[in-house]
Image (cartoon, coloured by chain):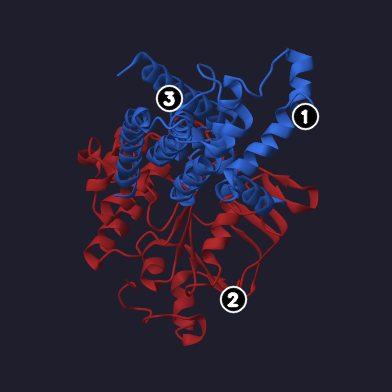
Chain colours: A red, B blue
Amino acid sequence: MKLNLTGVRLPLAPFTLQVDTHLDARITGIFGASGAGKTSLLEIIAGLRRPAAGRVMLDDRVLSDTAQSFFIPPERRGVGYVPQDGALFPHLSVRENLLYGHGRATVAPAGPTLAHVTEVLEIAALVERSVSTLSGGEKQRVALGRALLATPRLLLLDEPLAGLDLPLQERLLSCLARVRDEFRVPMLHVTHAAGEVMALCDEVLVLAGGRVVQRGRPADLFVAMATPRYGLRQPVEGPPAS
Amino acid sequence: MSTEIWQITWFTVWASALSLLLILPPGVALAWLLARKNWPGKSLVETLVALPLVVPPVATGLVLLKLLGRRGTLGGWMERTFGLEIVFTWRAVVVATAVMSFPLLVRTARVAFENVSPRLEQVARTLGAGPWRVFCTITLPLSARGLAAGAVLAFARGLGEFGATVMVAGLIPGQTVTLALSIYQQVNLGHDEAAWPLLMVSVILAFGALWLSERLGQRRAA
C-alpha cells in the first residue's frame, strides 16, 4: 500500500490542516492530541470531506485532485472507515450490518468471508443478535468486521479503543493485531494513546496543529519525544489512555 | 348518521388523503434537501414554505384564487392546456388543503431526517453504497416513523382546513363542502343542531389522527 498526500490543505476552526506526506507501512499510527486534525485527515482520505487543495493517491490511483477538480466519491474508493463509536446501523441486525458492504467492492478482488471475519474477531456468536444488545467492545468489533467484509484496500480506524475500559481495550488490541496478520489490510490507526501505537503500528506520524511534526518507528519516536510538547497525555510506557 | 354527513365525511377524508399524496414526494424531497444540503436561497425557501402556517388562511386562499382562477396565470394555463377548471371545484379543495398542510409535512419530515446521524450515512458510503442506496437503506428506514408522523399530521391538518378552501372552492353543496365548511354553513343558516354531528365527526377524526401521529413520533424518539 502506498498512500500519497500531496499539498493537502483544509482550513479547520483553529488552524489549517496541511499535510504533505507518503505512507507505506502496514499499520501507520496517526498520533496527536484531541483537535490536532486527525479525524479530518481520515475524512479527507475516505472522501467524506473535500480538501481545499491537494491530491490524494492510493497506490497508483488518484482519489482526489483539486487541481483537476477530480474527486472519487467514498463508495468507489475502496477505503474502509471505522469511526470512533463504530456507527453500527441500529435498524439492522449484526449479520445485516456485517454484510452491508460485502460483495459490493468495485476496487478490490475477492475478500474475506463472513465466517472467517467473525471467527478472527470472535463475533460469530453475535451474528443473529440485534445491534442494541451489544456492548461497546462488541460494537467496535462488529464495526471492524463490517469494514473488512467490504474488502477495503486501506482501512481507517478512528480511535477504535476510545471509550472502552482497560480489559476491553486489550482485547480489541489483540483483535486488531490478528486482523493485521490474517487479512493483511493496510491500516491507518488514529489515536492519542501511545500504548496503542507501540503495540500495533510499524510507523507513526505525529500530528499537531494540523501538521505532521514528526514521523518514524514508534519505539524510536516515543523515546525521543517524551515531552509534553506533542500533547502526550500519559507516560510513553504507561497504559493507553481511556 | 344521515347519508349527507357520510358523504361530507367521505369527501373530507378523500380530499385530505389525495392532497397528502400530492405533497408527499415533493415535501419529503424538500425536507431532505433542507436537512442535509446547503444551497443558495435555502433560508428563503424555508421561509416561503413556512408562510402558510402564519399568513391568515383566507389570505393564502385569495392568492390561490387569483393564481388558479380562469384569468390567473396558472388557472388560465391549466384550462387552455388540459381543459381543467380548478377554482370552485373539488380540485380547489385538494389544492388548498395541499398548500396548507405542506409546511407541516416539510417541517416534521425535516426533523425526522435531521435525527438520523450523518455519521451512519457516511459509513454506509465508505462501505460501497451510493447516495441513493444510502437514502433507501439507511436514511429512509431510520426516519420512517418521523416521516409517517409528519404525514399523519399533514393529513389531520388537511381534514380541518377552512379559510383557504372557502376562498378558492366556495360552498357548493355536494361538490366542495367539507366538514369544516359544512359546520360553518349550518351555523350560518341558524341550524346549530345540524352542526353538532359534524362537529363530533371532526373531533373524532382529528383525535384519531393526532393520537396516531403522537404515537409514531414518540416511538421514534425512544
Can you tell which mark lies on residue B20?
Answer: none
Nearer mark to the viewer, of 2 and 1: 1
Amino acid at the residue labelled 3: Val
Q: Nearer the viewer, residue B165 or A184?
A: B165
Categorize mark 2 by other alpha carbons within 10 Å: few (<14), some (14-19), many (20+).
some
Q: Which of A105 and B34 is in front in this view?
A: B34
In the rendered view, tell whether residue A105 sits above or below residue A213.
Answer: above
Q: Position of residue B131 (x, y in %)?
A: 56, 37
The lab-note entry on whether marks 3 and 1 share a chain reads yes
Q: Quadrant of the N terminus of chain B?
A: top left
Which residue has dot 3 on it? Answer: B13
Distance, label 2 to label 3, CA atoms, is: 61 Å
- Which residue is drawn at the image coordinates 74% and 20% (left, top)? B78
Amino acid at the residue labelled 2: Gly
Q: Where is residue B126 in the image (x, y as percent from the top left)?
A: 51, 43
SS for callout 1 = loop
Would you say residue B126 is visible in this rendering?
Answer: no
Which residue has dot 2 on it? Answer: A209
Distance, label 2 to label 1, CA atoms, is: 61 Å
Would you say residue A125 is visible in this rendering?
Answer: yes
